[in-house]
Image (cartoon, rainbow, N blue to C red):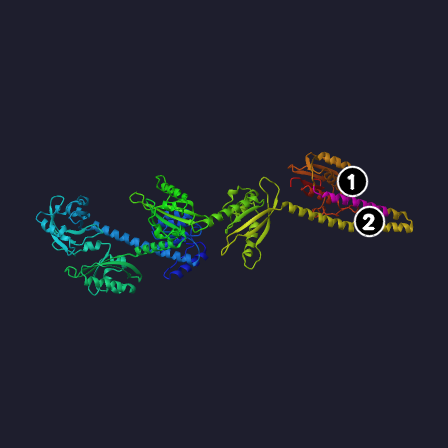
Amino acid sequence: MEDDPGVRKLTSELLHRQEDRFVVTKAADADEALSQLANAEVDCIVSDLEMPGRDGLELLDAVRDRGYEIPFILFTAKGSESVASDAISRGATDYLTKELNPKKITLLANRIENAVDQFRTSKQLEEHEQRLETLLQASHDIITVLDSEGIIQYASPAVERLLGYRADELVDEPFSKYVHPDDRQDVAAQFGGSARTDGTGGTHIEYRVKTADGEWHWVESTSESTWRDTVGGYVVNTRDITDRKATERRFESLVEQSKDAIAILEQDGTIQFLSQSIENITSYEPEDLEGDNAFDHVHPDDHEDVMAAFQQLIEEPDASPVVEYRFKRKDGSWRWTESTGTNALDDPAIEGIVINSREISREKRQKRKISRYETLLETLPLGVAVLDSEAHVEWVNEAFWTAIDKDEDEVMGVPFVEIIEEGLVSQDVADKYFDAVRHLLSSDNDDDRKVIDFQVDPPHVDGTCIYEGYVGLQELDEGEFTGTVNAFLDVTDRKERKHELEEYKDAMEAVPDGVFLLDENGTMTRVNEAWASIVGFEQEELSGVPFLKLVQEDIIDRDVVDAYLDLLPELLSSESPKEQAKFTTRVIPPNEDREHVYEIHISLLSYEDEFQGAAGVVRDITEKVHRQEQLERENDRLDEFTSIVGHDLRNPLNVASASFSLAEETGDAEHFEHGHEALNRMNELIETLLTLAKSGDTIDELASLSLRQLAQSSWQNVETAESTLLVEDDCIVEGDPARLKQLTENLFRNAIEHGRHDANVRVGALEDGGGFFVEDDGPGIPEGEREKVFQSGYSSADDGTGFGLSIVSEIVEAHDWSVSITGSAEGGARFEFDTNS
């Protein structure tokens, strides 16, 4: 089950390439998987962990809750040791980390095949054992196991039904105790120890036994003369023939209850008889194979060995050769089988070769696994030493004895302490070893291993290597300590890398800029204190947090993530020379009300085949941006001044020059008057320009001013004609006194010059307390003109300079305020100043 359709398809194709016989059914989520499971025959489930709806572990629970015992493999990239442990404890068959490459898919295919094989074998064994138990419970015959002295070691449940005894009552009792006195001699001759020493022939005898209620019943017992190690004695099959005079098939109960398959072959290999248990090995029913030549079903590569063992049985009747070979199953597959032969050609009851067979595929796989482990231990650079209970070396791999510059035979059997004393291993190792063993043997220990760090100084190596050691107990023998398994791994490079990482971490904390590392999924894996302070978190709270969370909580602009995702393909491209990208974001840091501007530099983390993530460095460029914006405003103002000087001042200058020239020529006083008016106009423009130039400068110091006193003082400096000033309520204004006076004077002048000479001007605090207003009852400012009135040179009066409200705008900007224009209640103009913006 996999929610990503691309991954589902690729995994399915890769599995099919590994094993053509795999039929893969795909499902996008748990519900679809359960539906398919209910409607189709499934041998194994391979599931991802993270899926929409129910995850892989919840699907596992649902499968087990519905009674499905089929193998379940968790195949995921989001796993961990705790997830693997949880999955196994909840009934998972196997756990494998997801990597979509041929090597990993090969491993997955092997795991699937092994899991299915083990499951089928286990089910077959369970079914076989259940059949045997059922047969024993339902059988009307009594099965007993006798030792060589005729003592009962086991009696089947049928003894209670037929004779009235409980089975456990008969155990350890002489078999002859229950035999009729007249029959004991014959029975002893058949079942006594002396009669069985040669291991030949068998027994078939009828005799009387006493029931629990004192009655005598005739029974018929049959037994092989062969001692059975699997049951620890001789098996005797007894049936009540009191009401019956004929016996049924010979040895049938024993044969049918055997876990091994029993076959009787003719001298040419033709199959005469097969027990029902042959089905467990070959999937064939006995009648399917009877009449076939057994050698036709043997693997060609094993044919010669099987024929040699069979020929030995014929030539040496007392031999019991054992041979391992592959037998062809009904489905065409090959299963490893072990067979033991007995020559019974001279036995009139058999007249054939008896072959006892069992499947050993699992044992073969176990041997291969052990062989692989041994190869692994010899080839990996992992030193392994097995010590007995006295700390003597029982076994070491090549990596161990090579590291201490010894031959293998010089190490075997040597006390580990001697290796320490020779200086081949640090004394600390011995101390930590014994501490580890004592801890593992402690009654309150819940570890299955102990990890220790120690140093080893091989004579042929210059300097000191750092090794990480592992100590684990061997399997206890009836609670007795039998020794330990020890391993060590050279971690010198890892320790050095750890030291380097610590240095990098110290460097991250030392720089004043914010630093964060992102993994391939955009999750912050490490941050420094500066970055945590910028976004308002504790440093440890950000580890493992997706960067997107900062966007979702409105701490970082969404544009930062978009820019990162847009630039990432370019940085990853082999054709791009760029190794770094940068972009800006705006953040209001915790406990501040001022917005800061940060520049983020993104660089890719080092990688080979797959993207590993990126590093980000965050630098506060707020002051730099403010200086740049201030410079831009000053440049704009300079451009504006240049335009005014080039246009507005040139016009009155030209008028004055022309008027004085005409006055000189004509002597007409009117021309002198026009010239003086032009000069006055120039003087007025120059004074206004000087005020405008100063109004936008940065304010260094602020003063607390009474709005009432400010308005009244400014009103005194304006030609108010018949106008009236009304201050409705007072408030405190923080600002530069001179420029605030200029602001109010210009507003009063604007109300009188562009309104009425008998205007009523009102001043007061805004209702929310965040500023003040100035309004009049004049004609007001049309809505379409309100955005233009703050532009330099804009004026609705012919004799106006057009800079009065422009100066107001510059003073507002210098104070970091905002101003808006609306209409007053009387229809005039209303200016509202927000001093908290």
Q: Quadrant of residue 298?
A: bottom left
Q: Check the image and name the residue furthest to the left.
A: 182
Instruction: State the count of labels.
Output: 2
Q: Main secondary structure of the magenta part?
A: helix
**Image position of 654 (left or right of 635):** right
Question: How packed is label 1: few (under 14 Cα within 10 Å), some, or many (20 or more)?
Answer: some
The residue that label 2 is drawn on is 652
Residue range highlighted in magenta: 674-698
Question: How packed is label 2: few (under 14 Cα within 10 Å), some, or many (20 or more)?
Answer: many
Q: Is residue 537 above or below residue 205?
A: above
Q: Which mark is residue 592?
A: none
Callout 2 secondary element: helix
Residue 820 position in % (x across, y down): 68, 43
Residue 561 position in % (x across, y down): 55, 50
On the question of residue 54 being in view, the answer is no
Q: Is residue 688 magenta?
A: yes
The residue that label 1 is drawn on is 757
**Image position of 568 (left or right of 237):** right
Callout 1 secondary element: loop
**Image position of 775 (left or right of 591):** right
The Cα atoms of the two marked residues, 2 and 1, are separated by 27 Å
- Which amino acid, by three-letter code, is at mark 1? His
Foreground residue among 482 and 769: 482
Task: Specify the quadrant that holds the N terminus.
Answer: bottom left
